[in-house]
Image (cartoon, rainbow, N blue to C red):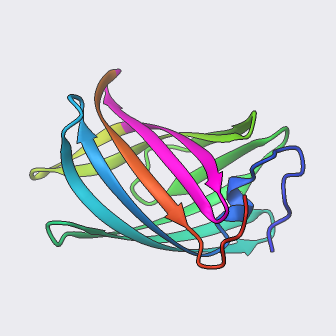
């Protein structure tokens, strides 16, 4: 089990241990839903690190897998890496919210394009976490991802 960050009222890394299911949407910059998806995730602790395997299924049948390696740092910080990431993601816990800034290579048409993700994770009640991610390219907002994560065991954040 990953050692809990006792300085944070909501510890995302500890919360993501075990199995998690999620549903989400991608909205374009005008707020129109462009994609819907589900996610099955499994997190396992390895010392001060959480390895999170995510399996995405999109409404058009596309499937994606992503493995995050999230490592707890000092002073309420954490870092993350994944295969399609550009550099290291930076995270922090502030006032009961977990923030993560990352850059991911996404397939758009036939090209791979690096997009910036600014995530905020909020405890939403027993066994639920809401994730809002602003997606941008060259500092221009291109859309937003909204995800509701649920634990089968209704574990509180």
Residue shown at the point (35%, 68%) measured from the top left? 38
Q: Nearer the viewer, residue 157 or 69?
A: 157
Dividing the picture into quadrants, the one containing residue 55 is: bottom left
150 over 106 or under it: above or below: below
Q: Nearer the viewer, residue 88 or 28?
A: 28
Q: Is 105 on the left or on the right of 88, as rendered? A: left
Magenta stretch contains residue 34: no
Q: Position of residue 126 (x, y in %)?
A: 67, 62
How many marks on residues?
A: 0
Quadrant for residue 2, please give it.
Answer: bottom right
Q: Is residue 96 above or below residue 2?
A: above
Looking at this view, name the residue that lies furthest to the front.
125
Residue 131 in the magenta stretch? The answer is yes
User: Which quarter of the figure is the N terminus placed in?
Assistant: bottom right
Q: In the image, what residue occupies the spot 20% across and 29% down?
A: 30
Residue 57: image location, x then y, percent? 29, 71
Q: Is residue 71 left or right of residue 115?
A: right
Quadrant location of residue 91? Answer: top right
Residue 113: horizontal and vertical position, in percent? Answer: 24, 42
**Farthest right residue?**
6
Q: Which residues are magenta?
A: 116-139
Task: Assign the C terminus to one quadrant of the image.
Answer: bottom right
The outermost residue toward the top is: 139
Residue drawn at x 31%, y 40% is 114
Q: Position of residue 62 (x, y in %)?
A: 19, 69
Image: 107 above or below 48? above
The secondary structure that most of the magenta stretch takes on is strand
The one of 35 and 65 positioned closer to us in this rendering: 35
Q: Is residue 99 left or right of residue 105?
A: right
């Amino acid at each position: 089990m990953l050692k809990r960050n006792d300085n944070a009222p909501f510890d995302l890394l500890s919360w993501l241990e075990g199995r998690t299911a999620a549903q989400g949407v991608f909205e374009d910059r005008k707020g129109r839903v462009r994609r819907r998806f589900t996610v099955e995730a499994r997190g396992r602790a390895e010392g001060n690190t959480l390895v999170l395997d995510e399996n995405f299924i999109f409404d058009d049948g596309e499937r994606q897998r992503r493995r995050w390696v999230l490592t707890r740092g000092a002073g309420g910080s954490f870092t993350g890496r994944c295969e399609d990431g550009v550099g290291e993601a930076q995270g922090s816990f502030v006032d009961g919210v977990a923030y993560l800034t990352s850059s991911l290579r996404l397939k758009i048409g036939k090209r791979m394009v690096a997009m910036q993700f600014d995530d905020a994770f909020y405890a939403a009640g027993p066994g639920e976490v809401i994730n809002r991610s602003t997606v941008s390219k060259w500092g221009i907002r291109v859309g937003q991802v909204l995800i509701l994560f649920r634990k089968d065991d209704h574990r509180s954040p």
